[in-house]
């Protein structure tokens, strides 16, 4: 197996998961379960392609994705935090709206239900391979700093662990949770944008369940952003290895392609109890 | 106050859903130009998710129905379900309105067709890529199937002749018998024209997500390129776009599937294996119009011109003439029965 290919593929495939997983820890630590990461990624992928096509700039594309993802999950935040809708019901709805909505916009704007035109702004060499991994590391560092060093970070953790204590000290829980949901949407959307940048276009349903793998990483890590990102890197490495093995040795596609998921499942079972002890107490 | 956002969300969802479920219509005003009929034949088509503009099957089905409008004077209406739950509803809608023929585009409809066809025994149904349930094909259903292995055999033959490194790739969508046919036919073709060639086979996954994961398609192709493959054929739906992207970046040749995919990645796609859903649909509408509808499996292979490869016109101009002649000779051998292409 070619080492350089393996390394590049691991990095490229880890980035979308990592963005969504880091966003997921922020949201879930505040006490709001977020299965809508998948939908936010898809919205981000679409917004990045649309922004890149309209402006011809990678920067504008990424900002579009960031804003669209945040705005999109603001609906989830409103529904769950303000209106008391079950976060699972709302999350399912968000994922359905993202799948149908992006397809609808695809047709309305680009006259195709399959894919957007090629985004030339994403063609610049190294754009996706360097800028997005760098951004992912920045997002992770900022999130770690936020949790460890800022008052708001501590309040956010309190909102997820002991909301009544937070209220007792004169803070409100709702706005903290709402903005945590919005932040997770914005970050997950960057993960989706990474997919669109790598492919140089948007394709209907192109996230293909990555938001759920990211969520598994969140849970596996015991809701810790650093470990969640590491879990994503591990998953990406396993996936790159199985891809490389398939190319070299044909004939075990069923087993090989299921291998990273199987490993994740086994890890979830093995670490599930320990991770479960770290579940934010007010998570619902 | 509190109800407003909820109401808004619900309204939005209804509008979004509704927009995808508005029947379209296409007719020439009932003026039959084909065989004379007092009342134009009414045909209802239910597309798979993606619908028109999917640059694949649904578009091909649409082209076939347009031809039926033009040449047979059929009155054709369309529905596009927004999700799984609407598939059966769409079929039922046409059947209940007394359409002469209801066509479902895609294997995913098979169980829905079973249910609705049994409830409406007087309506003719056709389903592309249908697979029978436990009780077999209902008596009023034409199961339109393709010999994908035969079309894949031709592009495999082309790949064997194109490859300089003697290594070629195949990227499948979901593992299973459906895509296996493509793989087996392709490998058979490759080894026909290049016995020493190595075929690298890879699949995107073992769930339906494998058909819409271009990032995975790109990674699989990159690995095959690293193993020196210089021609890659895919049968993986939207995942294939990642295959094309990787092929373009590496400067190797890619082969499209289902429809002529040249425009998806000009410069990388040298030919495509084409499933003529348009032929299958036109022939079925024609059979109903002429009162000779046949239920059960209707198989479209090379002989029936139901599968093909892109070898003419500007989309095939990167194929040398000698290669085209060689592969066309293979086609004749299959049609005459000299070569039997295995499917598994």
Image (tube, coloured by chain):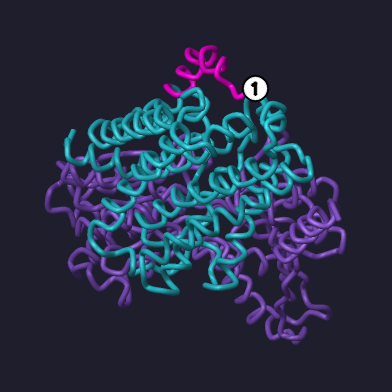
Packing grade of label 1 (10 A; few <14, some 14-19, many >=20) is some
Instruction: Name the side, left or right, on which B307 lies relative to A87.
Output: left
- The magenta segment is A263-280
Which is more toward the observer, B288 or B256?
B256
Task: Identify the subunit bearing mark 1.
Answer: A
Picture quadrant where residue B241 is located? bottom left
Q: Residue at x 24, y 66 (%)?
A: B324
Q: Secondary structure at mark 1?
A: loop
Secondary structure that dominates the magenta span: helix
Picture quadrant where residue A246 is located? top left
Which is more toward the observer, B79 or A262?
A262
Q: Residue at x 77, y 73 (%)?
A: B41
Instruction: Name the side, left or right, on which B84 lies relative to A17.
Output: right
In x, y percent, where is residue B342? 38, 41
- Which residue is under mark 1? A281
Q: Quadrant of the C terminus of chain A?
A: top right
Which is more toward the observer, A77 or B182?
A77
Circle count: 1
| Residue B17 visible somewhere in the drawing | yes
In x, y percent, where is residue A55? 41, 74
Query: Which colour denotes chain A?
Result: cyan
Instruction: Name the side, left or right, on which B159 lies relative to B39.
Output: left
Q: Residue at x 22, y 67 (%)?
A: B319
Which chain did the renderer colour purple? B
| Residue B180 visible somewhere in the drawing | no
Q: Residue at x 38, y 67 (%)?
A: A118
């Amino acid at each position: 197996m070619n080492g350089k290919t393996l390394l590049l593929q691991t990095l490229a495939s880890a980035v979308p998961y990592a963005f969504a997983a880091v966003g997921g820890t922020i949201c879930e630590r505040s006490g709001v379960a977020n299965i809508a990461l998948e939908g936010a990624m898809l919205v981000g992928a679409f917004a990045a392609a649309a922004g890149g096509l309209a402006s011809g700039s990678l920067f504008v594309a990424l900002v579009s994705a960031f804003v669209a993802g945040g705005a999109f999950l603001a609906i989830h935040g409103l529904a769950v935090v303000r209106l008391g809708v079950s976060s699972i019901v709302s999350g399912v709805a968000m994922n359905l709206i993202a799948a149908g909505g992006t397809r609808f916009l695809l047709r309305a704007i680009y006259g195709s239900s399959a894919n957007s035109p090629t985004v030339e702004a994403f063609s610049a060499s190294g754009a996706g391979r360097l800028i997005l991994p760098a951004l992912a590391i920045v997002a992770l560092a900022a999130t770690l700093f936020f949790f460890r060093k800022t008052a708001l970070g501590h309040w956010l953790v309190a909102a997820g662990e002991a909301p009544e204590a937070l209220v007792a000290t004169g803070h409100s829980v709702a706005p903290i949770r709402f903005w945590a949901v919005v932040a997770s949407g914005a970050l997950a959307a960057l993960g989706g944008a990474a997919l669109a940048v790598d492919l140089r276009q948007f394709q209907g349903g192109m996230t293909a369940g990555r938001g759920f793998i990211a969520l598994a990483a969140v849970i596996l890590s015991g809701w810790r952003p650093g470990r969640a990102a590491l879990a994503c890197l591990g998953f990406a490495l396993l996936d790159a290895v199985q891809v490389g093995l398939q190319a070299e040795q044909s004939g075990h596609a069923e087993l090989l392609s299921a291998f990273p998921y199987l490993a994740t499942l086994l890890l979830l079972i093995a670490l599930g109890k320990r991770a479960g002890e770290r579940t934010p107490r007010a998570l619902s | 106050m509190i109800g407003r956002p909820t109401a808004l969300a619900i309204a939005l969802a209804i509008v979004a859903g509704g927009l995808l479920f508005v029947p379209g219509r296409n007719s020439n005003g009932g003026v039959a130009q084909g065989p004379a009929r007092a009342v134009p034949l009414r045909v209802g088509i239910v597309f798979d998710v993606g619908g028109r503009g999917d640059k694949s099957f649904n578009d091909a089905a649409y082209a076939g129905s347009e031809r039926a409008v033009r040449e047979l004077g059929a009155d054709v209406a369309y529905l596009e379900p927004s999700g799984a739950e609407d598939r059966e509803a769409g079929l039922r809608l046409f059947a209940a309105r007394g359409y002469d023929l209801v066509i479902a585009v895609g294997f995913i409809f098979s169980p829905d067709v079973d249910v609705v066809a049994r409830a409406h025994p007087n309506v003719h149904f056709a389903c592309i890529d249908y697979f029978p349930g436990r009780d077999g094909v209902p008596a009023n259903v034409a199961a339109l199937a393709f010999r994908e292995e035969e079309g894949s055999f031709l592009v495999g033959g082309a790949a064997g002749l194109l490859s300089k490194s003697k290594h070629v790739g195949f990227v499948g969508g979901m593992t299973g018998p459906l895509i296996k046919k493509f793989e087996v036919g392709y490998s058979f073709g490759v080894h026909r024209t290049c016995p020493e060639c190595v075929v690298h086979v890879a699949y995107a996954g073992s769930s339906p997500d494998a058909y819409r994961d271009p990032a995975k398609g790109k990674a699989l192709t990159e690995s095959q390129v690293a193993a020196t493959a210089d021609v890659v054929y895919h049968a993986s739906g939207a995942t294939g776009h990642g295959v094309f992207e990787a092929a373009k970046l590496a400067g190797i040749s890619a082969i499209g599937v289902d429809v002529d995919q040249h425009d998806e990645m000009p410069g990388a796609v040298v030919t495509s294996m084409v499933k003529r859903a348009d032929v299958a649909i036109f022939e079925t509408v024609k059979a109903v119009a002429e009162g000779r509808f046949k239920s059960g499996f209707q198989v479209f292979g090379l002989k029936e011109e139901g599968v093909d490869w892109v070898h003419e016109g500007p989309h095939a101009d990167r194929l040398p003439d000698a290669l085209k002649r060689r592969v066309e000779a293979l086609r004749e051998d299959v049609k005459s029965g000299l070569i039997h292409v295995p499917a598994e």
